[in-house]
Amino acid sequence: MDGGSLIMGVMQIPVTVVILAAGLGTRMKSRQAKVLHRAGGKTLIEHVVETALEVAPAERIFVVVGHQAGEVRGAVAAAGVGFIEQKEQKGTGHAVTTGRAALAGMAGYLLVLYGDSPLLRAETLKRLVTAEAEANAGCVLLTALMQDPTGYGRVVRGADGRVIRIVEQKAGTPEQLAIREANMGIYCFRSDLFWKHAEEMGANNLAGEYYLTDMAEILARAGYGVEALRIEDAREALGINNRIELAEADRLLRERKRREWMLAGVTLENPETVTIDGGARAGMDTVIGPFAQILGKTTIGENCRIGACSIVSDSEIGDGAEIGPFTIVNRSVVGRGATIGPFARLRMQNHVGEGAQVGNFVELKKTRLGAGAKANHLAYLGDSQIGAKANIGAGTITCNYDGFEKHPTAIGAGAFIGSNSTLVAPVEIGEGAYTGAGSVITHRVPADALAVGRARQVVKEGWAKKRRELRHR
Ligand code: UD1
Ligand code: CA
């Protein structure tokens, strides 16, 4: 089988994908290239490349870059796709023909996608390629009937219903602009025909650009069929041109993800308030509270509870763990059955062991908390290794920074750190040892010892009464 084959039933269709992403996107009013803006937790270009990878192997996917080419490449380079540099942006037609050297030799079909259409689904692309193969048309384009097609190219059909051309918004006559069938900017061409006729695209229009959409008329005139595949829901091909459309795409992608999770057995409370990134996963019977955000590459196990307004990003949460409300968990691992929060912060690179407890107003940074250990109230634990079942009293602070460098704290299994202990790192507290409440611990405490580092209490009988009497004389 050829590496570029797409299998649909018995049919094998070699597809080459070209994704246009060189434009700045003037209508975004941004210093950042349009395709680098984010929706659904990813850049627009990442969404399109991921969809393309479902219909063609990375060696047959090319992204046309121009504006901020380095950054756009950086956003998707890991996928292994190829790049075509369009130095000057002279239109969508010019963007494709810039890739002639890389693309023209590829047999089969040429699928053109725009980098600003992040909602497109792979199933739709497969239908488009199948339609092209079955009709053996010169081109099949994706279209939709829209309530308000303003901004989109309009699909002009002849008396026999066949597509004869696409007219851009800027160039349309009132009659053409009344057409509600819009061009979604997604095309499947017969590769050989595309390259044979590509040079016929001209730039004699109002914008002075080479319009890819002209290929419809060029191929139709040359006698090849130009077909339109209508999709039911135009929102799937929403092209992002401004920030209102960006917000709409974000909303739709989030909704899609929420439905996916709910259908997979995750309960979302007030689902419309929950934000879930594309790369996140969750197991059955997990419950996510209102306004929670599950971001990045987070993996949540089964039977977990994520409290209202919590933010969990790039983390791994074990089965049965509970993240209380208003809690932040970032780049950390939380073991099975552990409880975190409410109002806790796992800042980064923490590992909370099975069944451990991290309570309100506790901050962890680069800390490993052993199985069953507890830090239930008001503490800062940084650069620490804490053994199983240790108990960290309320108000404990690891002084891990001396103004120049960070230092580690080690607390053995079963140790009991008295409330308001100040542990001046580097310092080590042995297994089963105690520190007295309010102690400042600066030296190693051996296993099973008690360390008390505070001034001895002095009681002056009657002192307060005398003072009052002196003042009121
Ligand atoms: C385009 C279509 C329009 C369609 C709409 C669908 C043309 C001429 N018009 O209009 O019929 O209804 O998409 O969303 O194609 N790009 C380049 N190089 C260039 C110009 C553009 O790579 O020289 C890229 C852009 O970065 C963008 C994509 O092509 O990702 C589409 O360009 P855009 O300017 O957004 O086209 P529309 O005006 O939306
Ligand atoms: Ca667009």
Image (spheres, rainbow, N blue to C red):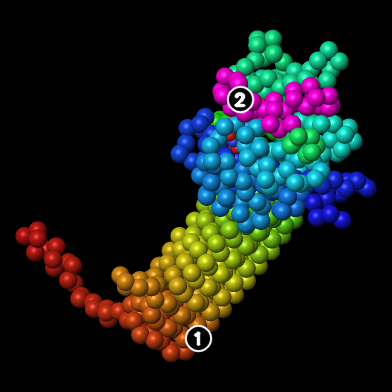
**Disc 2 vs disc 1: which is toward the camera?**
2
Residue 203: in magenta span: yes
Quick one: quadrant of the C terminus?
Answer: bottom left
At x 69%, y 25%, the residue is 214
- Gap in angstroms between the C-alphas marked 2 and 1: 78 Å
Q: Residue at x 35, y 77 (%)?
A: 424
Is residue 171 rendered to the left or right of residue 161?
left
Q: Quadrant of ligand 1?
A: top right
Q: Is mark 2 within 8 Å of ligand 1?
A: no
Q: Is residue 123 above or below residue 174?
A: below
Residue 346 seen anywhere in this rendered image of the structure = yes
Question: Could you say which is closer to the camera, residue 350 or residue 113?
Answer: 113
Residue nearer the viewer, 189 or 365: 189
Assign a secondary structure to mark 1.
loop
Residue at the left extreme? 473
Q: Quadrant of residue 34?
A: top right
Q: Is residue 240 left or right of residue 378?
A: right
Q: Secondary structure at mark 2?
A: loop
| Callout 1 amino acid | Glu
Residue 294 part of the magenta-drawn span: no
Extreme residue toward the right, this view: 10
**Image x and y of residue 248, in percent:** 61, 33
Q: Does residue 183 lie above or below 53 as drawn?
A: above
Q: Please indicate whether residue 445 sits to the left or right of residue 269 in the image.
A: left
Q: Answer yes or no: is residue 35 visible.
A: no
> Where residue 342 sits: x, y (%)?
53, 56
Specify start and end residues of the magenta stretch as a single range: 197-226
> Which residue position holds label 1?
431
